[in-house]
Image (tube, coloured by chain):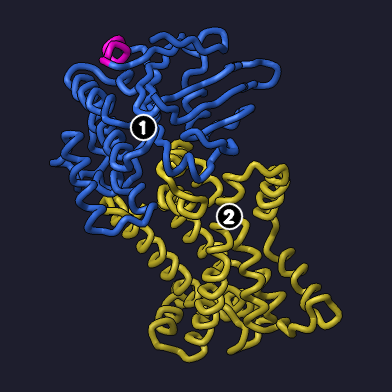
Chain colours: A yellow, B blue
Amino acid sequence: MGVLHATGEALTLALSGDAALLAIIGVSLRTTLVSLVMAFPLAVAAGYWLATTRSPARAVCIWLVQTALSLPTVLIGLLLYLLLSRAGPLGNLQWLFTQPGIVAGQMLIGLPLMSALTLHSVQAVDRRIAETAIILGAGRARTAVTVLFEARFGIVAALVHGFGRVVSEVGCALMVGGNIAGETRTITTAIALETSKGEFAQGIALGLVLITIALVVNAALLLLQGQARHVPAGAA
Amino acid sequence: MTALLELAGVRKCYGERTLLDLDSVRIDTAGAYALTGINGSGKSTLMRILCGLEPASVASSHWKGAPIRWSPYSGLLRQSVVYVHQHPVLFSVQVAANVGYGLRVRGVAQPQLQARVHEALQWAGIGHLPGAAVRNLSGGEVQRVALARAKVLEPDLLLLDEPTSNLDGAAREQVLALIASLVGSGRSVVMACHDRDLINLPGVQRWKLRDGKLETKP
């Protein structure tokens, strides 16, 4: 099959509203969004803590977070598989080959990246911002909100990068999800499966969907950054 | 004159090096002080200790005559002392929101907050700038916003770190006039400075840091 022919078929498939295709897209978006909703606040809190704490554990924590960035997702999938398998310590949850299992894996993948990016964004904020907030009477929580507000561009970028990393990963979703049609088959695991079967059209169609999602998310980021240039009246 | 803040045995060390070793620091209610000394003598460090940003060893401390436990970031310091950095930094919100920040933190109701912010902006001569973006402000305007942001809280003690050092011409004159109006306004003011015009303001006592010790002159 020629690439052009396969791409033509893929476009037809992508635009046809194919039920199987929509189900795959639905699983991908649902698991990605749930994992981000759960992981993002944790990542922002962790990144802020890492950037501001004077705890002796800070250096070790940063080392672990940065090491986690370079772990292949298939290794995270393997570790999670061992934890969630029937004989594993979290086997009682019965999350193996389920969407909650994929969500857990995606959280583990997204957390270090978003934490590290938040850490660097907060570190880039002028130290006098936090000092000024404290001097003007802010407590710890208010000071944190003020600093995070000043770091908002970097934090939104962390979210977008987290989305990109999570939605495009294949190794963990394959191992923990099992690629079950209609249940745990995501865009990336479906691409891997269809390509291995020689079904290039569906693989390309799903690839186009993934690219479209990436384009939309990044366009949203650019819009957000553009809006943020209009100085807010008083959000700090 | 009654004492607002009295500290005894103030010591600040960096490793083996002792930067400050002060027998006592006394700031009178409504008193005004110009803290001088060569660069690196510890002026900014002392200012930061006084507002609680810099930890230091303090043997005893009294606030309005009552003994207090000296600790950085204490609630008392946050509510009563305001420090303005040598190069003030503004939050990336509009000017009025910057000036109103401390009032919002204190839970001041919106109508009262707006009135006080308006008054502070007028006092600082920036009444025409409430909706301005801070990135568009000149150095003098930034300093005036920072002074308005401090004054609006009506602190018992105002600490100004080299308030005119990065200004010249009309901007410096405007800031000098604002500081002159703060001195003698009923609140205590300490200024770290080299500026003769600040040091010679009426009613200002001179402090000099030399070799880690504080010399006071009437």
For residue A46: magenta? no
Q: Which residue is mark 2?
A: A115
Q: Secondary structure at mark 2?
A: helix
Vertical comparison of B174 with B64: above or below: above
Q: Chain of mark 1?
A: B
Q: Quadrant of residue B216?
A: top left
Magenta segment includes B200: yes
Pointers 2 and 1 in contact (CB under 8 A)? Answer: no
Measured in 3D between alpha carbons, the distance from the residue under mark 2 to the one under mark 1, in whole angstroms, is: 29 Å
Residue depicted at 19% across the width and 24% down the height: B174
Q: Nearer the viewer, mark 2 or mark 1?
A: 1
Q: Position of residue B114 (x, y in %)?
A: 22, 53
Which of the labelled discs sits on residue A135, or is there none? none
Q: Amino acid at mark 1?
A: Pro
- The residue at which mark 1 appears reads as B88
Q: Is B24 located above or below residue B78 in the figure?
A: above
Image coordinates of residue A98 in percent, x first then y, are 66, 84
View extreme (right): residue: A87
Q: Range of the magenta residues? A: B196-202
Of all chains, the one bearing label 2 is A
Which of the 4 image quadrants contains residue B165?
top left
**Mark 2 residue crowding within 10 angstroms, few (<14) / some (14–19) / many (20+):** many
